[in-house]
Image (spheres, grey):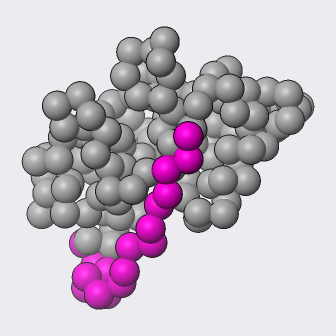
Amino acid sequence: MQVHEGMSRTVLTVGPGHSLRAVARLMAERRVGAAVVMDPDGHGPAIITERDILVGVGAGQSPDEETVADHLTRDVVYAAPDWSLEEAAAAMVRGNFRHLIVLDGGETVGILSVRDVVRCWTEDGAICPVPARVAVG
């Protein structure tokens, strides 16, 4: 099975100026663990995860004052839609992360989570619908 078969095609997308609280609220509402960060001044999409937010709040930083730009992961490993799920899972284990942004020709076409991989690899996962993920500018 390939990444494009298991990934979520609609991705929560935020800007670098969003507060940590705003992103946490959007992620909680959509029941996702990561958001793609589109920064016009950046070099490709970045990612902010629930772990990034947790680290900031755990360090005593204000979720209302801290912005995504100060907490996102810029050194991102991207997956291609034609990668096997095994390749994607191996990349996640090597990098110690749970989400891969899927790029095709430089365009973000989806996101793959560990949960997506497990869903694809389990018998029950084949009949479970994937929740929709909505882009937010």
Locate residue 46 relative to residue 102 in the image: left or right.
Answer: right
> Does the magenta-highlighted stretch encompass residue 49?
no
Residue under the image location 32 percent in, 80 percent down: 125
Residue 50 is situated, as x and y percent measured from the top left of the image, at: 63, 47
Quick check: can you spot residue 93? no
Task: Choose top left, top right, bottom left or bottom right for residue 91.
Answer: top left
**Residue farthest toward the top in the current orientation of the protein:** 41
Q: Identify which residue, 42 or 90, lies in the foreground.
A: 42
Residue under the image location 74 percent in, 44 percent down: 22
> Does the magenta-highlighted stretch encompass residue 122?
yes
Residue 82 is situated, as x and y percent measured from the top left of the image, at: 10, 48
Number of marks present in the image shown: 0
Q: Quadrant of the N terminus?
A: bottom left
Q: Is residue 33 above or below residue 97?
A: below
Residue 104 is situated, as x and y percent measured from the top left of the image, at: 19, 37
Residue 10 is situated, as x and y percent measured from the top left of the image, at: 39, 56
Q: Identify which residue, 4 or 50, lies in the foreground.
A: 4
Q: Identify which residue, 110 or 115, lies in the foreground.
A: 110
Locate residue 61 relative to residue 129 in the image: left or right.
Answer: right
Q: Quadrant of the C terminus?
A: top right
Residue under the image location 83 percent in, 37 percent down: 63
Task: Choose top left, top right, bottom left or bottom right for residue 90.
Answer: top left
Quick check: can you spot residue 14? yes
What stretch of residues is rendered in magenta? 121-137
**Residue farthest toward the front in the current orientation of the protein:** 137
Majority secondary structure of the magenta segment? loop
